[in-house]
Image: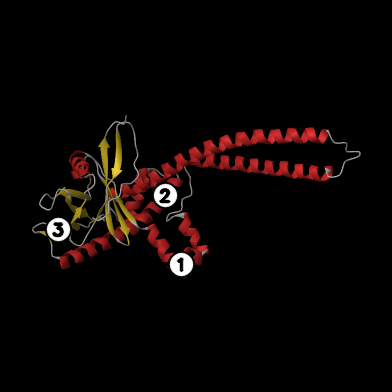
Amino acid sequence: MRKIHQRAALFDEESFTLTSSGRFGKEGCLDKKSLLKPKEEAVAQLAELRAYIETMAEHFSRMVHSAWVMICHGLEDGEIKASLTKQYSVKARVANAVINQARTRMNSLSALKVTQMEELESKISAYEELLEDQKKEHKEWHQGVNWHKPQKGDCQKNRYWKRKLNNMKNRLHGMKQKLASWKEKIENSSFSCCFGSRKLFKAQYHLIEAGFANHEEWKAAWRKARKKSYYLFGSSDETQGNQLCQLTSESKLGSDWFSLLLRSGFKDDKTGHHIAVRIPYLKKELKDNLENRSVSYRFVLKDRGLYIQPMVTIQKKFP
């Protein structure tokens, strides 16, 4: 691994979660008998692993999209899990990871909308006060004008006031409508979400400015952005904190080297991938988590390589 990334974390009073990152290199392939393999075999095995991750990432993205729709329709986790395992022929742990990702994103949007709703309520309250002040100011000015013999510019100014107040009323009405819409979405847990980023989606309408030669090139980038990661949800009651992905410290290679066993997520598929990865950041905390905590993993596909991101929980109280 040549680059280390510290990613965003969720904090509470007793613990916080950090995500370490390691990149698979050509020198990092293992078998059970002879630790490091020759370079040619390492390249072939790494290509095989990347092909599997790409396949799983594509299935995973589709399952997340399906789970999102089912959550919006009010289905329970058990119903979603049964539907995913039957439709995509994946193991229950993969379905659990899919539901976790969809629920997490839904909860994040819900929390964001609650914050935005509070800000909008405050904005509406302040705007209503401003509108009342403007109405009062207009009324005082209007009463002070002799409309039997108006002066030059009085009629024009009165039309200006009417347009201004009407625009303010329309804006206030729009904010109240938006607030009501957000409240309904929060109550029904129904949110719109653009997988792959809204910015990239809108780039199809401005191809040249966005750096795309044609629509086909944009479509390829769009599909790639929607299936760039594969997530495995961990559990503390499973071996090394995860059923389908397990790390084991390899002291013969160095203190920051681990052997990775990645099992297939498809039903009736007993195959697996055994490969080495170097994770120098948070290695001590990662080893502790492997013994008695759940460890979730995210595999990220990038142009410069394939990355693994184990999620490490650290017990600590902040001052």
Q: Tag 1: residue type?
A: Phe
162 sits to left or right of 9? right
Measure the C-alpha gap from mark 3 to mark 2: 37 Å
Q: Residue furthest front?
A: 152
Dividing the picture into quadrants, the one containing residue 151 is top right
Q: Residue furthest left?
A: 33
Pointers 3 and 2 in contact (CB under 8 A)?
Answer: no
Identity of the residue drawn at 39% across and 43% down: 76
38 sits to left or right of 226? left
Q: Tag 2: residue type?
A: Trp
Which residue in the protein does label 1 denote? 212
Which residue in the protein does label 2 denote? 68
The first of marks 3 and 2 along the sequence is: 3
Classify 10 Å Cα crowding around label 2: few (below 14), some (14-19), many (20 and above).
Answer: many
Pointers 1 and 2 in contact (CB under 8 A)?
Answer: no
Choose mark 3 or mark 2, whichever is in front.
3
Q: Position of residue 179 (x, y in %)?
A: 57, 40
Measure the C-alpha gap from mark 1 to mark 3: 40 Å
Q: Position of residue 129 (x, y in %)?
A: 65, 33
Measure the C-alpha gap from mark 1 to mark 2: 30 Å
Asked if one can make out residue 187 in the rendered structure from this viewpoint, the answer is no
The one of 53 and 315 positioned closer to us in this rendering: 315
The first of marks 1 and 2 along the sequence is: 2
Choose mark 1 or mark 3, whichever is in front.
1
Q: Quadrant of the N terminus?
A: bottom left
Which residue in the protein does label 3 denote? 30
The one of 157 and 207 positioned closer to us in this rendering: 157
Q: Is residue 14 above or below residue 273?
A: above
Assign a secondary structure to mark 3: strand
Q: Is residue 116 above or below residue 45?
A: above
Assign a secondary structure to mark 1: loop
- The colour scheme used here is secondary structure
